[in-house]
Image (spheres, helix red, strand yellow):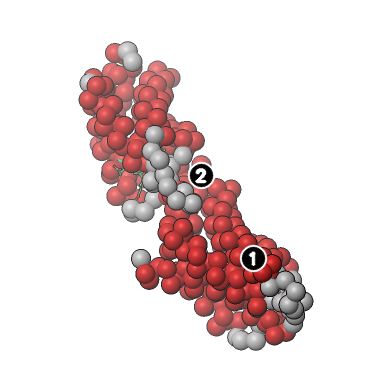
């Protein structure tokens, strides 16, 4: 990194620091405009986060003259970003939002040379952080990104839980009208329970592996309720539609993929256990054939049972 690059970055940063709070606000606004799903990765309030980011960048800029000391600091920072659910591709989005912020803050002082200098410096910082991040081994069936995207996006649904439950049931009956007469209890009441239980399940997502046995037992029990494999798809479709409607542009492909991953993991575990139960009871009356109005609780049981299992584990942890 040449001296001129360092000088341009340091001088222009000196102009941004006095307005660092405003710059951080602009930065996150732009970042979430470019990728609305990224907001779900952040747990700390965004003004707190902004201060930490500016402080880290300030440290990086002053450390440009002593890269030997700076690299280990950035390496540690990068490694910490793995459990935050950050992916290498996010560094491009952050870089774009950051350069845009500099442009807003510096106005005419954001010359082509300044832009090139910052692009080079950000590139070095990002590379050190990404390399460090990729060394981190993450365990468990669900990635931290999935956990944060599911938990963060759910928090946005909670304030509109009643509406979300209504959307869910309307969609469910639209996909499969034969389910409608099967629900005996008041839908509003049922919707409240559904949302409560989903909330508990979402909290338990980070400990998913520990609930596998409970989910398997649950899947096996659902054979008796007359639940078929395709019911899981119906619920999935209605749930994804509900999230899409509630989250609007924040229901990005990444957020959708996270929900699909969690739902698929749970439902596949249940279906596999159900199949095993059916195989071992082959010869006796098939519960699938006995699917009648008696199985009215099918879908509700499927979903609520699954969520209760998570809730049970949650209380144990
Ligand atoms: C130049 C690159 C970056 C710098 C200097 C930076 C700086 C920081 C700092 C100082 C923190 C506070 C916590 C800590 O020190 O571990 C943090 C947390 C975090 N950063 Fe970054 N970051 C960078 C890139 C990214 C990227 C590309 C993303 C992806 C969107 C990201 C997302 C996050 C998240 C999600 C947290 C944790 C928030 C929380 O748990 O509340 N960062 N970052």
In this rendering, does residue 102 appear at all?
A: no
Q: Nearer the viewer, residue 216 or 96?
A: 216
Q: Earlier in the sequence, mark 1 or mark 2?
A: 2
Q: Is residue 77 left or right of residue 276?
A: left
SS class, disc 2: loop
Q: Are marks 1 and 2 in contact (CB under 8 Å)?
A: no
Q: Residues within 10 Å of mark 1 (few under 14, many from 20)?
A: some
- Going 64% across and 80% down the picture, which residue do you hit? 297
SS class, disc 1: helix
The numbered dot on residue 304 is none
Image spot of residue 114 (x, y percent)? 38, 21
Disc 2: which residue = 35
Quadrant of residue 122 within the rendered picture: top left
Quadrant of residue 230 within the rendered picture: bottom right
For the N terminus, which image quadrant?
A: top left
Q: Is mark 2 within 8 Å of ligand 1?
A: yes
Q: Residues within 10 Å of mark 2 (few under 14, many from 20)?
A: some
In the displayed structure, 150 sits above or below 225; it is: above
Image spot of residue 124 (x, y percent)? 37, 24
- Going 68% across and 73% down the picture, which residue do you hit? 281
Q: Is residue 207 left or right of residue 64?
A: right
**CA distance separating discs 1 and 2:** 42 Å
- Going 34% across and 38% down the picture, which residue do you hit? 79
Disc 1: which residue = 276
Q: Is mark 1 within 8 Å of ligand 1?
A: no
Q: Nearer the viewer, mark 1 or mark 2?
A: 1
In this rendering, does residue 106 appear at all?
A: yes
Image spot of residue 23 (x, y percent)? 34, 40
- Going 49% across and 35% down the picture, which residue do you hit? 89
Q: Nearer the viewer, residue 57 or 144?
A: 144
For the C terminus, which image quadrant?
A: bottom left
């Amino acid at each position: 990194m040449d001296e001129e690059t360092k000088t341009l970055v340091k001088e222009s940063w000196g102009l941004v620091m006095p307005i660092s709070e405003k710059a951080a606000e602009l930065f996150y606004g732009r970042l979430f405009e470019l990728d609305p799903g990224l907001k779900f990765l952040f747990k700390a309030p965004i003004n707190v986060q902004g201060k930490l980011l500016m402080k880290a960048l300030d440290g990086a800029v002053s450390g440009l003259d002593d890269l030997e000391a700076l690299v280990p600091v950035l390496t540690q920072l990068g490694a910490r970003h793995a459990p935050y659910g950050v992916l290498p591709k996010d560094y491009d989005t952050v870089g774009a939002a950051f350069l845009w912020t500099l442009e807003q803050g510096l106005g005419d002082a954001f010359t082509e040379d300044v832009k090139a200098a910052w692009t080079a410096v950000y590139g070095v910082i990002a590379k050190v952080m990404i390399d460090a991040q990729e060394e981190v081994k993450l365990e468990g069936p669900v990635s931290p990104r999935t956990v944060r995207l599911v938990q963060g996006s759910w928090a946005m649904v909670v304030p509109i839980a009643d509406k979300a439950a209504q959307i869910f049931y309307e969609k469910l009956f639209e996909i499969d009208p034969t389910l409608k007469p099967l629900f005996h209890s008041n839908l509003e009441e049922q919707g409240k329970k559904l949302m409560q239980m989903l909330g508990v399940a979402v909290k338990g997502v980070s400990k998913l592996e520990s609930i596998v046995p409970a989910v398997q037992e649950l899947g096996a029990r659902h054979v008796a309720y007359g639940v078929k494999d395709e019911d899981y798809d119906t619920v999935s479709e209605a749930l994804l539609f509900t999230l899409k409607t509630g989250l609007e542009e924040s229901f990005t492909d990444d957020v959708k993929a996270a929900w699909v991953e969690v739902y698929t993991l749970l439902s596949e575990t249940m279906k596999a256990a159900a199949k095993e139960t059916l195989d071992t009871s082959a010869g006796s009356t098939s519960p699938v054939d006995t699917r009648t109005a008696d199985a009215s609780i099918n879908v509700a049981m499927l979903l609520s049972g699954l969520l209760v299992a998570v809730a049970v584990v949650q209380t144990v942890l």
